[in-house]
Amino acid sequence: MDVERVFHMSGGVGKTSYAQNSSLQKKASDMMKHITIETIQQVYHEVTAKSLGIADLGCSSGPNSLSLIKDIVEAVEGCCHKAFRPLPEFRVFLNDLPTNDFNSVFKTLPDFYRDLKKDKTERCPAIFIAGYPGSFYGRLFPNNCLHFIYSSYSLHWLSKVPPSLYNEHGKSINRGNVYISESTPPSVSRAYWNQFQDDFSLFLKSRSEELVTGGRMVLIILGRIGHDHVDRGNSFFWEILSRCLAISVSQGEIEEEKLDCYDVHFYAASRNEIEEEVRREGSFELERVEMFEIEREVQRGESYGTAVAMTVRAIQESMLYNHFGNGINLDALFNNYGKMIDQEMAKQEIKPITFLLVLKKL
């Protein structure tokens, strides 16, 4: 499957869109916003550039896309006022895969500029915003043009499903599972780890050429706590999806062979694995690593399982339709998914964890 051609969050602003189902990601970003703001302020004090280059990698299409940019601009404005320095201009690059719904982001730009001007007596800084479609597993920008890079909930997505998951006949060695599970052979977890190593190393190398010396990256990424890949964290959500797809097979909605060859391009790295790759690649100093568990918060009348199901659907819908065809009943699939999450939560907590990394270009 060509991930770059197929994978995208569900566009638009409808009930199943990412725009309507990204509140969990927004809550996490807000929890860690103070670290992001501290980092951009530190960069500004150290580089004192007249033109700041900022990139959001994996910007997606929901309301989260521009809210962080507004916070960054206002944080730098505050630094300038305190130091009696003129405002820099901002060059903002919004990146995601070519299939991303960039139009929905651009439609919010008038509101973004209007909010920035609100209650201001002085002129607003010059802000130049552009979309940059393409995979961040490779070069995107010219040399030394960026001062700050932000990426939230994107780097756990691999550039592709690990090729070594399939034998010489094209059959998956992870039959019946969409990710690493208790029943998968050790070669499956090795395949995922090797793909993550290749991708993350390429990501770091590419960004090191685009960032100025002393530039920073703030990366928010799903992960796992320890050595074991199978836990009641992020991997468990994929276990639930495997079970729900198995129900669809038993009801004759999808073919078993289709399920057997469906694998997600995802990897939940441990802290040790991330630190090892940063050291091995050598372009960055890992200044800070924080681990978070996001508190459960759902809308009135909605269960936690339903909230998670709608989020997973907004993320996986494009891949599921591409692989299983338009005949798959996603309403029924994710209705079962939400119920299973609630049932499992009644037995024992599910605790997905998130890492925040701050890296400095050497």
Image (cartoon, rainbow, N blue to C red):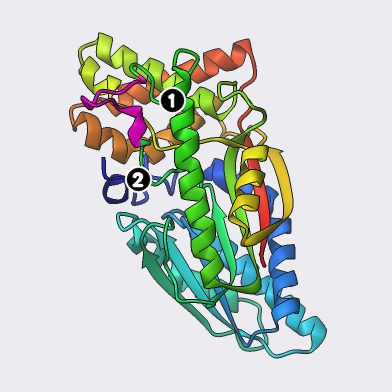
Give the number of callouts.
Answer: 2
Q: Is residue 311 above or below residue 74?
A: above
Give the magenta range. Answer: 163-174
Q: Position of residue 122 (x, y in %)?
A: 66, 88
Most frequent secondary structure within the magenta stretch? loop
Q: Residues within 10 Å of mark 2 (few under 14, many from 20)?
A: many
Q: Position of residue 114 (x, y in %)?
A: 52, 75
**Left or right of 179: which side holds 32?**
right
What is the three-letter code of the residue carrying label 1?
Answer: Val
**Residue 167 inside the magenta-drawn segment:** yes
Depth check, mark 1 against mark 2: the one in front is 1
**Left or right of 216: which side holds 164?**
left
What is the three-letter code of the residue carrying label 2?
Answer: Ser
Q: Is residue 117 above or below residue 1?
A: below
For residue 188, the mark is: 1
Q: Quadrant of the N terminus?
A: top left
For disc 2, the marked residue is 10
The answer to which image quadrant residue 43 occupies is bottom right
Q: Position of residue 169 (x, y in %)?
A: 20, 24
For residue 240, the mark is: none
Whether residue 206 appears in this view of the structure is yes
In the image, what residue occupies the spot 69% across and 90% down? 86
Q: Quadrant of the C terminus?
A: bottom right
